[in-house]
Image (cartoon, helix red, strand yellow):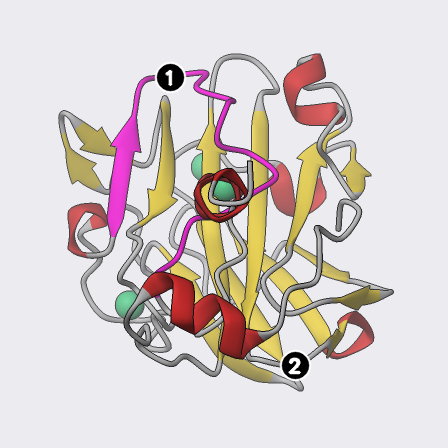
Amino acid sequence: MRPLKIALTAALLLGLAGAAAAQSTCLYFSEYIEGTSNNKALEIYNATEADVNLAQVTVELYFNGAVTPAATVALSGVLHNGDVFVIGHSLASTPITSQADLLINGGVVNFNGDDAVVLKLNGAVVDCIGQVGIDPGTAWGSEPCTTVNHTLTRGVDVCCGDTVTNDAFAPTATWVCSAVDTFGLLGVHASNCQAVATDEATWGAVKSIYR
Ligand SMILES: [Ca+2]
Ligand SMILES: [Ca+2]
Ligand SMILES: [Ca+2]
């Protein structure tokens, strides 16, 4: 929910891009940081092509194979299309706390690799990281891509979340892994899923045409 960028029309952007991107109507996790100490964060991306009333959005954390959430948070505010909402641990390093729209001391960002996180919109599951009801031991996945000591970002061509919370979870299916304590991707999300490009890299490319 950083300040909005220059508002070009969709038509203009489509003309510049040369081709329409795949359409998405989904809200989903775009980043998961499970780093050292309290360096933990979740990023939610709005690809619904409309504003989302965050009062309709909840995040749940399921510890160690539990089938009921140990922590739940209801969000508030408005998340514009193409923007991200960042939940960070309040004791995390500055690169996380400075990007966070919501800071929580624990709660839903108290995961440590073997805990499932679920995103709901109007009470319906729209995304899940991990497998609810299963304790994977230490983490899901295998090196070099696991849910512990990594930053996971959603693939640019992933246009909707994982709505099945209790099936097997393989991070590499829809996520890209970066090294532990990678913070530079937090606060923006690059996506090919919208007609209107909104990520920083694409905006930079678009704006450079006018320079
Ligand atoms: Ca755990
Ligand atoms: Ca799943
Ligand atoms: Ca991001």
Q: Position of residue 128 (x, y in %)?
A: 41, 63
Can residue 132 be seen here?
A: no
Q: In the shown orientation, is residue 119 left or right of residue 96?
A: left
Q: Position of residue 73 (x, y in %)?
A: 75, 59
Q: Amino acid at mark 1?
A: Val
Label annotation for residue 45? none
Observer-nearest of 32 and 154: 154
Q: Which stretch appears magenta?
A: 175-192
Q: Position of residue 148 (x, y in %)?
A: 35, 28
Q: Residues within 10 Å of mark 1 (few under 14, many from 20)?
A: some
- Within the image, what quadrant is residue 46 found in? bottom right
Q: Which residue is mark 1?
A: 180
Q: Amino acid at mark 2?
A: Ala
> Label 1 vs label 2: CA separation?
33 Å
Label 1 sits on a secondary structure element that is loop
| Residue at disc 1, CB closer than 8 Å to ligand 3 | no
Of label 1 and label 2, which has the lower sequence position?
2
Would you say the magenta stretch is mainly helix, strand or loop?
Answer: loop
Q: Position of residue 135 (x, y in %)?
A: 31, 48
Label annotation for residue 50? 2
Can residue 122 be seen here?
A: yes
User: Which mark is in front, 1 or 2?
Assistant: 2
Q: In the shown orientation, is residue 17 left or right of residue 146?
A: right
Rendered view: 42 above or below 74? above
Seen at 26% across and 61% down, the residue is 157
Seen at 37% across and 69% down, the residue is 193
Residue placed farthest to the front in the image? 211
Seen at 32% across and 36% down, the residue is 147
Q: In the shown orientation, is residue 62 left or right of residue 90?
A: left
